[in-house]
Amino acid sequence: MIIDLHAHSDASDGTDRPAELVRKAAAAGVGVLAITDHDTTGGWAEAAASRPPELCLIRGSEFSTQVLGGGWSASIHLLGYLFDPDDPAISTEQARLKQERRRRGLAIVQRMVDDGLPITAEQVLGIAGNAPVGRPHIGRALVASGVVSSVDEAFASLLAGRAKYYVPKVDTELVSAIRMISAAGGASVIAHPRGRGERRVLSSELVGRLTAEGLTGLEVDHPDHDPAERAELREMAARYGLLTTGSSDYHGHNKQLRLGQESTGADVLAALIDRTSGVTAPLGSPDLVR
Ligand code: AMP
Ligand code: ZN
């Protein structure tokens, strides 16, 4: 069975409506899908209401976190699963991040406008709708205005971290995010720990300390990881007794990834569910995963 534990809808920076996402997942043969929009669980109600009966759904979110060092800050994405979505600490932090993403998105747009690029704040806010604003929304505006021909091209140039338009955002500190998810009854998994320059900061020693703070697992099988990185992460997970998951990180047509492209073992999913308090259960047949 295909178990895909990382997918985005248009409640964040994916392009499929939640209803469309669950329909496509079932059509792709996915048996269990986690909805993990950035900094929100806003897509859940629609996804749950439209769930095809053969698809088991897991409520989650991808938390934007940072590790702070002396004079530097590194971005780490943390997947939270089956936590209480009404937990006050999580709701408050997600509301703050939504504001912070709006501030930062508009600051990036302003830099582009000041430089003569033909996009507007209204256009980007219109594309984002109710979703927390992300660089992919700005990328789509740049495509619509003919500045670049694809969101990928925008990320390789104007939206890159080294570009002159880049503005950072203040994310949740990584250890507090792990603790927050545990306190809300959920399980936490570091997303693509070797995907985007995380190697600099996510040493084996740090992962050991995060495990002691309650980290549940590492997303080992991710499209951005090559075989050597997967082997290294599997070894690190074994060292600390962490679970190893696999997922597509599907974003609709913002990125060229297929739902179910990577998968998590049924035994791993069962262990992950065992690590949660039960405050939020998978939606759909539980014997699918036992
Ligand atoms: P932000 O969260 O606003 O900093 O934007 C980063 C997000 O953009 C990442 O978490 C990915 O979901 C997405 N992303 C990164 N690279 C690309 C790309 N080449 N095309 C589309 N989306 C991307
Ligand atoms: Zn993601």
Image (cartoon, rainbow, N blue to C red):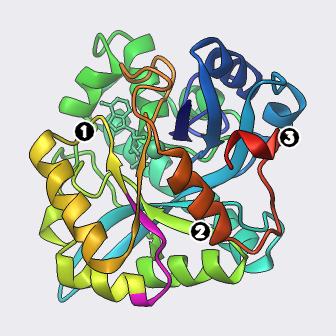
Hey, what amino acid is under mark 1?
A: Asp
Compare marks 3 and 2 and give the one earlier in the sequence. Answer: 3
Q: Nearer the viewer, residue 141 or 118?
A: 141
Q: Nearer the viewer, residue 97 or 233?
A: 233
Hey, what amino acid is under mark 2?
A: Ala
Hey, what amino acid is under mark 3?
A: Ala
Q: Position of residue 18 (x, y in %)?
A: 72, 28
Asked which secondary structure carries label 2, the reply is strand
Which corner quadrant of the figure contains ligand 1? top left
State which region is magenta: 212-218
In this rendering, would 44 be left or right of 226?
right
Quarter of the image for residue 244 reads bottom left
Asked which secondary structure carries label 1, the reply is loop
Disc 3 versus disc 2: distance between alpha carbons?
21 Å
Q: Position of residue 239 (x, y in %)?
A: 25, 77
Q: Is mark 1 within 8 Å of ligand 1?
A: no
- Which residue in the structure is indicated by mark 3? 45
Question: Which label belongs to residue 190?
Answer: none
Question: Which label belongs to residue 187?
Answer: 2
Q: Quadrant of the N terminus?
A: top right
Q: Position of residue 212 (x, y in %)?
A: 41, 90
Asked which secondary structure carries label 3, the reply is helix
Q: Indicate which label's residue lies in the foreground, 1 or 2.
A: 2
- Which residue in the structure is indicated by mark 1? 224
* On screen, residue 124 above or below 287: above
Identify which residue is drawn at 74% across, 36% down: 56
Quarter of the image for residue 19 reads top right
**Disc 1 residue crowd, few under 14, some 14–19, many 20+, Cα 10 Å:** some
